Image: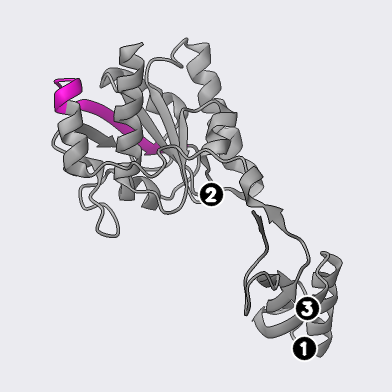
Amino acid sequence: MIIKPYGDTLNDGAIQLSFTLPVKCGGKAKEAARLFVLQLGFKSCEVAEAAPLADGFTFFTAYARTDASIDYDKVDYVDAVGDAVMTMAQVDEFIRANFGRKLVIVGACTGTDAHTVGIDAIINMKGYNHHFGLERYAMIEAYNMGAQVPNEKLIEFALAKKADAVLVSQVVTQKDVHVHNLTALIELLEAGNLRGRFLALIGGPRISNKLALELGFDAGFGPGSYAEHTATFIVKTMKERQSR
């Protein structure tokens, strides 16, 4: 199935773009923004908004059209859990029926990243957006180590708690700092012969399941993921490995 962006009519190729250029806001800046968008390969462009951000910086909103299309049937994508996401009650029942004990999950925002919003949303009892966190699950013993946790400390704590799974949140992604930090974690696990000791999951606004697998993790969760997504992946994967 060949698809194109949808704006006013199906397959019209209309796209909205927003970006910042390091120039003073004005007519010349808008024209520069229009020409820049055209250089990206769009066949037409209209700059709808130009607003000053600070001295010498302007934010633009532009609408452009493209002839580019994509064959949707050839898109290679594998979601960590697909559509079969279990509810909190289903996860608890699955654990009771298949493991007969509480599963232990340790989470942290590692490296220099000081943002706890992601790991808090997944682990803390209140959760986020009407989705309870793992602390609320009756059959999960969840630990939130907070932010700026060194990879070594996360591994040490996970071993001490005999964790079944480790969750790593990465929010800051400038200059691929998250990739470097996550790679370092995998290398530490492999160096200690611990890679198979527990499931290793990552999440964050720039994280995808594809990136997670490429880096050597078991699964990755991006925006729109909640505690039940990670819990579903953990219990089903553990069950699969238990059956082997």
Q: Position of residue 178 (x, y in %)?
A: 56, 40
Element class at badge 1: loop
Kindly identify the residue that appears in the image at 25 percent across and 46 percent down.
133
Q: Are marks 3 and 2 in contact (CB under 8 Å)?
A: no
- 231 or 175, which is in the foreground? 231
Observer-side mark, 3 or 2, equals: 3
Q: Which residue is mark 1?
A: 26
Name which of mark 3 and mark 2 comes first in the sequence.
3
Q: Which amino acid type is marked by label 3?
A: Cys
The crowding category of the residue bearing disc 2, from other C-alpha atoms within 10 Å (few below 14, some 14 to 19, many at least 20), is: some
How are the residues colored?
one colour
Q: Which amino acid type is marked by label 1?
A: Gly
Q: Which amino acid type is marked by label 2?
A: Val
Name which of mark 1 and mark 3 comes first in the sequence.
1
Q: Which mark is residue 80?
A: none
Q: Quadrant of the C terminus?
A: top left
Q: Is residue 85 above or below residue 239?
A: below
Left or right position of 185 against 6: left
Q: Which residue is mark 3?
A: 45
Q: Are marks 1 and 3 in contact (CB under 8 Å)?
A: no
Observer-side mark, 1 or 3, equals: 3
Q: Which residue is mark 2?
A: 172
Say if the magenta span includes residue 16. Answer: no
The crowding category of the residue bearing disc 3, from other C-alpha atoms within 10 Å (few below 14, some 14 to 19, many at least 20), is: many
Over which residues does the magenta segment extend?
96-110
Q: Position of residue 134 (x, y in %)?
A: 24, 41
Kindly identify the residue that appears in the image at 47 percent across and 11 percent down.
192
